[in-house]
Amino acid sequence: MKRKKKVLITGILGQDGANMAEYLLLGQKKEDYKVYGMMRRSANPNFKNTHKFKNHPNFEFVVGDLTDQNSLDNIVESIEPDYFINFAANSFVGVSWDMPLHVMDTNASGVIRCLEAIRKFKKECKFYSAGSSEEWGDVDYSPQDIDHKIKPRSPYGASKAAARHIVKVYRESYGMYAVHGILFNHEGTKRGEEFVTRKITKNVARIKKQLSDPELKIVPMELGNLDAKRDWSDSEDFVKGVWLMLNQEDSERRGEFNKAFEELWEHYKNHGVALGGSDIEGIARESAIPLIKDYILSSGETHSIREFVEKAFSYAEISGEWKGEDLEEKFITKVNKKEITLVKINPKFFRPAEVELLLGDCTPIKKELGWKPKISFDKLVRRMVEFDLNEQASNSQVYCK
C-alpha cells in the first residue's frame, strides 16, 4: 500500500490553513495525504473553520507554537512531515504597531524556528512560508513583481520581509526546498472578523436585518481609509497556488540535486569555505533541475475599500450614496424619505503609515506553474455577503462590531 505523504499545516484554525486542509483532504487529492493541523494551546479554541475535516480519518490536530523551538522540534521529529506549510502568523497590520516585538518574534523568528526544526530532523521536507504584499510597502511601480524593492511601512510588513530573506538564506545555505509565496489580499467566508473585508460583509448583513425590523436601532459601520486600494482574491484559489509552489520540480531529479549538494557541502565544510548561491545554481544546471523560486499570488487588478463597501451593499440589495468630505464622509440610504447613515469614518482605524496601492504581477506563476484562479472580485464579495446574510438570518442575535 502506498504511503500517504504527511503534511504539517500551522495556522489550521485560520482561513488559509483550513482551506488548505480542505483542498488536500476533500478535494482532488483527498486519497494521498495525512494532514496534521498545528494549533496553539488555548482554553477556548475556535474550531469553526475546521468543521468539514476535523473528524476526517486522515486529519489530526497537534499542539505547537511558532515562538517555542522545542514544540516545533518535537512535532517535526515525531511526524517527519513531507511538507511543512506555515500559515500561522500575527496577521493584523494595524495591531503590529502596538506589539512590534511579538509580531517580529512570531512572523520572522518563527520561520527560523520552523526551518531549524526541518534542518535538524527532516531536511528533505518541503517548506512554505506565507509572505505578504505589505513587504513592498511604499511601492515604486505597479504592478509589483518579485524583484520590486522591499520597503515595508509597518512592523508587520517588515516581519514578512525578514521571513522572505530567511527562507532564501536557508534555501541557498542548506539546499533546502524552502519557498516564500508573496500573497496579496485574499479573503473568503472563513476570514476572521478582525479583517476589514469580513467586518464589512458581516456589518452589511447586520444592517440588512436592522433595516427590516423597525424596532431595531441601526448602528453605522465604522471604517478608516476608504481609498486604500488592494489586489483582492479568494483564499481558496490561493491555497492551490501555494501547493503548486511546493511541487515545482520532479522529485527523482530533486533527489539527485540533494545528493550533489551534500557532497559539495561536505567539501566546502572540510575546507572552511562558505557555500554560496552561485554554487547551488551550478549544481542545478548540471542536474538539469530548475531552481526553487518564490512566486506572487494576486488577481492583477485593484479595488478600493470604498468599492468593496459599495459592492457589498449592492449584493444585499441596499442602495445608498456617499455624502460629505474627509472625516465627515458617510454612506447614506433613505427609508421613508429619511436619511440613515450606514457607514461613517472613525480616525482610530487609520494606520500610522498607510500603503495606498498594492497590485501584484502574478504572470510568472500562471505561465510557469499553470496556476488558474477562478473567483473574481465580484464573485468574492457576493459569496461573502451571501454567507453572512445566511448566518445573520439564522442567528437571533444581531452582530455589531
Image (cartoon, helix red, strand yellow):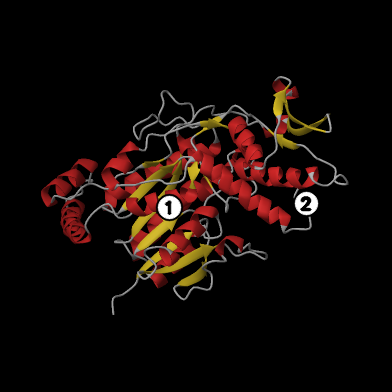
Which residue does the image show at 71% across and 53% down from the upper left? 392
Quadrant for residue 343, please give it.
top right
Residue 194's spot in the image, x, y percent?
64, 46
**Residue kind at label 1, given as amino acid type:** Val
- Residue 379 appears in the rendering: yes
Instruction: Name the element at disc 1.
Output: helix
**Residue kind at label 2, given as amino acid type:** Val
Left or right placement of residue 129 versus residue 330 in this view: left
Residue extending farthest front? 336
- Mark linked to residue 239: 1
Left or right placement of residue 74 versus residue 207 in this view: left
- Residue 88 appears in the rendering: no
Q: Is residue 252 above or below residue 94?
A: below
Q: Earlier in the sequence, mark 2 or mark 1?
A: 1
Quadrant location, the N terminus: bottom left
Residue 186's spot in the image, x, y percent?
50, 44
Q: Is residue 331 above or below residue 40?
A: above
Quadrant location, the C terminus: top right
Residue extending farthest right? 215
